Amino acid sequence: MIELPDEFLRMPRWWTEGADWLRELPRAVERQCRQWDLTVVGAVAHGSNAVVVPVTRRGEEFVLRMSPPGQEVAEQTWALRWWAGRGMAHLYDAEVDAGAMLLERLSTPLTTRPVDEAVAVLGQLMRRLAVPAPADARSTADIVTTRSAQLEPEWERLGRPFEEAILREALRIAPTETTSTAAVNGDLHSAQVLAGTREPWLTVDPVLFQGDIEYDLGRVLWTRLDEMPNIIEYFDSAVREAALDRDHARDWVIWRTVDYWLWGLSVGLTEDPVRCARLVTALSR
């Protein structure tokens, strides 16, 4: 049986949910390996809610990804199949009810690369992934419309944690309309991109939307903001690499950052809200 990393076992999320799944996980990996004729060949890696096990089958290399079964697994499987390896890890097999995916073996994460390189790669991937989206993918405009209605009540409930002018600006420029039907990855950042062999960098754990590909540019920036001596330079680099309209990209970053700022405060985050304040200040006119 596999040995689960202590860091994964100690994650606070397992204190309130998923304890049964976690306890059964080594046996679930063993069952999935038997079902798919896989041999474990290395140590287990992990993210926040999944483990990744290096495996082989008849000389071919893969990884077995196991996470708690549910809607998230179904949506990721759908997204991976839709992109079908374009800028994305190949999905070879999946059993959604078991939370299991058999994926292309990748290597070094983009988090290991300097921030200027990482931002350029992420900008390129935003454009690379922008194929015509499935008609039933959720629209970025609908997401903004729904969430924008929640921002002011949340701001009030949290005790007006930042200047009202920032909230008003975010609501004023909220991108509630789009003519784009491009595919959008709604969870794009350095930790979700790994070095590949078919392509230099490939994305994992996608969330598939349709609409404005600028949707997650804010996350591209705030996840590595502490490494950016000049935030505007990195913003401009991503805009250039993704071939975006600069003003529209700025509006998206402001709106998404205010959205995340309020969400972060609501769940007790302390460091990311400070980064959000810096990012909004840097991009404010």
Image (spheres, rainbow, N blue to C red):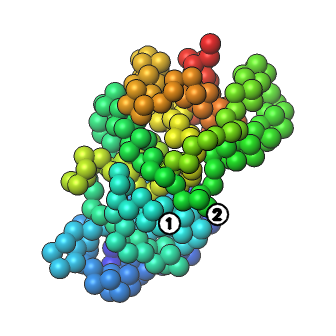
Tell whether 240 sits left or right of 171: left
Does 213 sit above or below residue 285? below
* Residue of label 2: 16
Of marks 1 and 2, which one's residue comes earlier in the chain? 2
Residue occupying image coordinates x 68% and y 47%:
143
Q: What's the amino acid at mark 2?
A: Thr
Compare residues 2 and 260 and report the one nearer the observer: 260
Q: What's the amino acid at mark 1?
A: Trp
Residue 210's x, y, as percent?
57, 50
Number of marks drawn: 2
Residue occupying image coordinates x 34% and y 59%:
85
Compare residues 99 and 11 and report the one nearer the observer: 99
The C terminus: image quadrant: top right
Does 78 sit above or below residue 196? below
Residue 110's x, y, as percent?
33, 42
Q: Secondary structure at mark 1?
A: helix
* Residue of label 1: 78
